[in-house]
Image (spheres, rainbow, N blue to C red):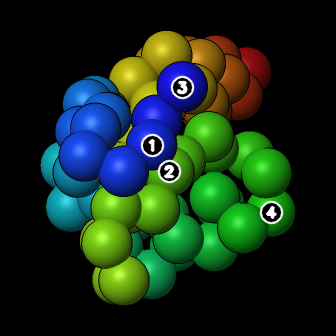
Amino acid sequence: MVGMGTIATVSGVPVADAAAALGVNTSRVRQLIAAGQLAGVRVGRRSWLVDAESLDKLRAKRESGKKS
């Protein structure tokens, strides 16, 4: 449990890196998070970290769709 005086560690991929991996801009990554297509966690007031597994799944889904 996280309480006062406890620091929680959060890991993930920065939005800019996720955008580069998907070939989209950072606004699109935030839209995908809001739509539930990517899992992300807000860090601070304006920053987000994207769950790496969620990013890999979406990237694989997009790549398989391009090959068809």
Q: Is residue 65 left or right of residue 11?
A: right
CA gap, disc 4 and disc 1? 30 Å
- Residue closer to the observer: 49 or 6: 6
- Residue closer to the observer: 60 or 27: 27
Q: Which mark is residue 35?
A: 4
CA gap, disc 3 and disc 1? 6 Å
> Which residue is disc 2 drawn over?
41
Three-letter code for the amino acid on which mark 4 is drawn: Ala
CA gap, disc 3 and disc 2? 17 Å
In the image, residue 66 lies at what x, y percent?
A: 61, 32
> Which residue is disc 3 drawn over?
1
> Which residue is disc 1 drawn over?
3
Residue at screen point 36% across, 51% down: 4
CA gap, disc 3 and disc 4? 28 Å
Q: Is residue 19 left or right of residue 17?
A: right
N-term-proximal mark, 4 vs 1: 1
Residue at screen point 34% across, 61% down: 43
Do callouts 3 and 4 mark residues in contact (Cβ within 8 Å)?
no
Secondary structure under tag 1 reads loop
Work out which quarter of the rendered image holds the C terminus and state it: top right
Secondary structure under tag 3 reads loop
Three-letter code for the amino acid on which mark 2 is drawn: Val
